[in-house]
Each structure stands twice: as structure tokens, then as C-alpha cells.
Image (cartoon, grey):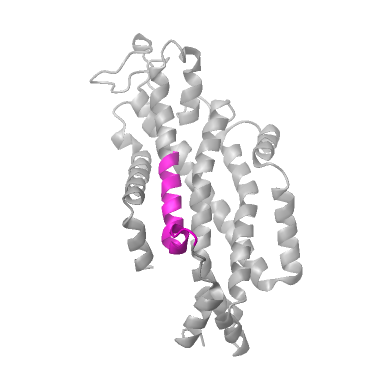
Amino acid sequence: MRLRLKRLFSDPLAALSLGVITLIMTAGAFAPFFAPHDPYEVNMSLRYAGSSMEHWLGNDHLGRCILSRLIYGIRPSVIWVFGTLLLSALFGALLGLVSGILRGKTEAVIMGACDVVLSFPGTVMTLAIVGMLGVGMENILLAFILLKWAWFARVVRASVLQYTESEYVKFAKVIGVPTSKIMTKHIIPVTLPDFAVAASGSFGSMILQISGFSFLGLGIQAPHAEWGMMLNEVRDVLFTKPEFVIAPALAIIITVSSVQFLADALQKALNPQLSAKGTVPVTSVATGNQRLAKGEVAG
């Protein structure tokens, strides 16, 4: 694990991306300390005012501080999305582990539910759920939880099935090692990389989706701040005052790009063979043989 982390941080782009994400989430978590003004304070005398020493990014159509709203917008745009991602990913990973280990009818039921969920386009299903429950950030996040778990269940199940066929796992079963111990010592540790890569890759797409729904007026409602909603609020002056679009648009671009760069670097750090063009990844069976030879199988 230390070697993988060292490999990850040896990539300057990955380290920079992680720093940017950490800075953004810290600013959002402690928004009252970082925001220079009240993001909800209306001052019509400053309507569409340009940048100044007091308001670095200017003011919006209600005279509110854009920088303050941008910082407060991190919470629904990034932090809430991250929390939703954790819930859906952990729930899906648990079901994937259960189906991959128990197999049989349990696997058939769980994978059948995954097939049903994944058979519909995610955006369409999200719109359908929002249409039934009503607009609002909470309903969109709930739709994400209800829909995205199936993808993580599939990923984790495939990883579990791959490693359960390894010789060191078969040997552990033969000598009578309990299934719970096999899962905690042999299966879960080796499936974590696949889970981490899948989760990090989904984070950026979820940020884009939540911003898109808010831009369409389906997400968080006024007067709360959210990056997609901030873009919606300035669309009437898109061509006359385009500078007011730059801040929220750049926030989305920088955050999503940092997440994607970090996801790519994480994938390469966890599986170095991917960075070598034309190199075939080492199979899990070979890894299992090495571990078996070293006596690392749980007893």
C-alpha cells in the first residue's frame, strides 16, 4: 500500500489534482470562515457590479457576492455529491461482495436487480424520479443512490469472482478457513483497488450531472448557492456580460478535471501495467501462487 501511495504522489499532476480537490472541499466545509460576505445578502445597488477590492469576482443580478456564493456552492456541488457517492458505492460494494461470495440464488436475485436498474439510461431514470418526487437537490441525490449502486455492485462482483478463483483462496477453503475470514483477509483487500478506481471515476460525472440538473432548474432552489444554478442565474446576460459566467464555469471545469486526473493516476498507481503500453497485466492466479508460496494464506 505504501508503494502504491508513493507511486501515486510521484505523479506531479496527481499530487496537484489531490491538492486542488482537498483545497476545494476544505473551503466548502468551512465556508463561513472563507467566504468574505454573506452569500444571501441582497444589495441591488451592486447589481452586476464588476470585480473590486471588496468583491473580487463581482456581484450577481441581486447584488450578492459571487465569490461567497461560489464558496458556499461547493457544499451541494461537491461535498453533498461526495457523500452520496460514498453511500451508493458502499451499498453496491456490499451487495457485490455478497453476490460474489454466496453465489446461487442470492447472486441471481442481486444481479437481476442490477440488470433492471442498469437497463434504463441513468439520466432518464433520474428525471423520472425527480418528476415523481418533485424538484430539489435532495431528490436528485436520492435518485443517484437508488441508481448508481448497481454499477458498483457489478464492478465489485466481477472483481470478487476473479479473485475467488485464485489458488490461495481455494487452498484457504480446502483447509477450512471460515468464509468471513477469507473475505476480510483475501477478498476485500484485493478488490479495493477496483472499487477505488470505479468510485473516483464516477465522482466527476456526478458533479457534472448535479450541476446540469441545477442549471435546468431541477436541483437546489433559490436562494441557495450551487454552481449549476449560478450559471442558470446569469444566462440572461450571457452575451452582454459573459464575465459573470466565468467563475462558476471554471469552478466546475477545474473540479471535474482534477477528479478525472486523480482517477487516472490512481488507476495507474494501483495497476502499473496500464502505464506500460502493450504490457499484459499480471493475472490474479500468478499473484495467488506467489502469496501461497510465501505462506500468506489465512489459517
Which residue occupies 58% across, 82% down? 167
Which residue occupies 62% across, 30% down? 135
Chief secondary structure of the magenta span?
A: helix
Which residues lie in the magenta part? 256-278
When the figure is inspected, residue 149 is found, relative to residue 236, above or below; the finding is below
When the figure is inspected, residue 66 is found, relative to residue 151, above or below; the finding is above
Residue 144 spot, x, y in % from top left: 60, 44
Left or right placement of residue 59 versus residue 148 in this view: left
**Magenta residue check for 259:** yes
Tell me where residue 172 sits by quadrant: bottom right
When the figure is inspected, residue 41 is found, relative to residue 285, above or below; the finding is above
Q: Quadrant of the N terminus?
A: bottom left
Q: Residue furthest bottom?
A: 175
Could you say which is closer to the camera, residue 42 or residue 191? 191
Could you say which is closer to the camera, residue 275 or residue 144? 275
Left or right placement of residue 38 versus residue 236 in this view: left
Give the number of callouts: 0
| Residue 226 visible in the snapshot | no
Left or right placement of residue 49 versus residue 161 in this view: left
Left or right placement of residue 184 versus residue 113 in this view: left
| Residue 148 visible in the snapshot | yes
Which residue occupies 50% across, 39% down? 207
Residue 276 spot, x, y in % from top left: 44, 60
Q: Residue furthest front?
A: 278
Residue 114 spot, x, y in % from top left: 70, 55
